[in-house]
Image: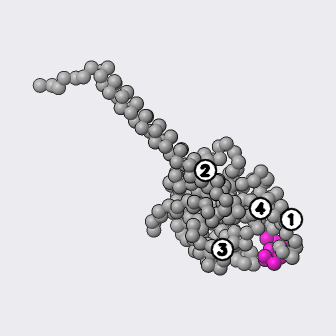
Amino acid sequence: SAEAKLPDYIIYGKLAVSLAIKFFFGLNATILYKKKLEKNIKKVMESESIDDCPKVPLPEIDEKQNYIFISYSHRDYKQVFSDLALMYEKGVRFWYDYDLVAGKNWNKEAFKKIRDPRCSGVVFYLSENLFLSQSVIEEIRITLGLDNDNQPVDNPVNYFSVNLTELMPSDIIFKARASMSDEEWRARGYDGDWNLTLLTAFRDKATYVKFNTPDHNNQLITQIKKNFNVM
């Protein structure tokens, strides 16, 4: 015999209950996620130095998965680590100097990580500190495919920037340059051509995300999805 058909009001009632349960647990999961993220960022912001700051763990990345390289100055660690906490919670695959120090070994490791075929690109955290960091300058050269004489030797790697300041990128570069004497600037291997290289690479109209905006988190994740296959 044919099975008895349930009345429509019971069918739709069950559906409504099911949707309500899914919404309730989904809402709770979102709230818990936000609380966890806020707690992690608070710990970073309350730290006194990068040495006593809880570092964001490196995501698990297998041999076939892409990742992005994070380039920043250690002096800007609070802003950068707060973004990394967001990326980690959102499932972004990234790599940064979790347990390495600047120096010759770091430059070799940076070259290896940036030029790896799995590296989808680089995210630079723009500030005056960034352009005064010798290690970061090497990362910029590697990303742009330049040798130590700023001559092209390889194809550039995809990249975009997060602006940690209220200045335009060109003004950040000029401010960094003005903080050093000509002798100090040249001692780092910089010259007029390098100034032009930086201004071209980080031109004002290039794609970058402002850090100090209410919608920064959404903009950052949107740009990562748009530019890199790492989620």
Label 4 to label 3: alpha-carbon separation:
18 Å
Cα distance in 3D space between marks 2 and 3 = 26 Å
Q: Which mark is residue 102?
A: 3
**Residue plotted at (79% across, 53% down):** 167
Q: Which residues are magenta?
A: 186-194
Lower sequence index among marks 4 and 1: 4
Q: Which residue shows up at 40% across the image and 36% down it?
A: 22
Question: Which amino acid is tagged 4?
Answer: Glu
Which numbered disc flags the more N-terminal residue, 2 or 3? 2
Tag 1 near tag 3, CB within 8 Å: no
Look at the numbered disc 4 and give the secondary structure of its residue. Answer: helix
User: Is the residue marked by circle 3 packed among few (<14), some (14-19), or many (20+) residues within 10 Å?
Assistant: some
The mark tally for this picture is: 4
Q: Quadrant of residue 81?
A: bottom right
Q: Earlier in the sequence, mark 4 or mark 2?
A: 2
- Look at mark 2 in the image and give the residue it sits on: 42
**Element class at badge 3:** loop
Q: Is residue 219 left or right of residue 59?
A: right
Q: Which mark is residue 32?
A: none
Q: Nearer the viewer, mark 2 or mark 3?
A: 2
Q: Which mark is residue 178?
A: 1
Q: Which residue is mark 4?
A: 128
At x 68%, y 64%, the residue is 74
Query: Distance between the Cα atoms at labels 4 and 2?
Result: 24 Å
Q: Residue furthest left?
A: 1
Dot 1 lies on which element?
Answer: helix
Question: What amino acid is found at the position of numbered circle 1 in the picture?
Answer: Ala
Q: Is residue 90 above or below residue 5?
A: below
Q: CA separation, marks 1 and 3? A: 24 Å
Instruction: Tell me which numbered mark, 4 or 3, is placed earlier along the sequence.
Output: 3
Mark 1: few/some/many CA within 10 Å (<14, 14-19, 20+)? few
Q: Earlier in the sequence, mark 1 or mark 3?
A: 3
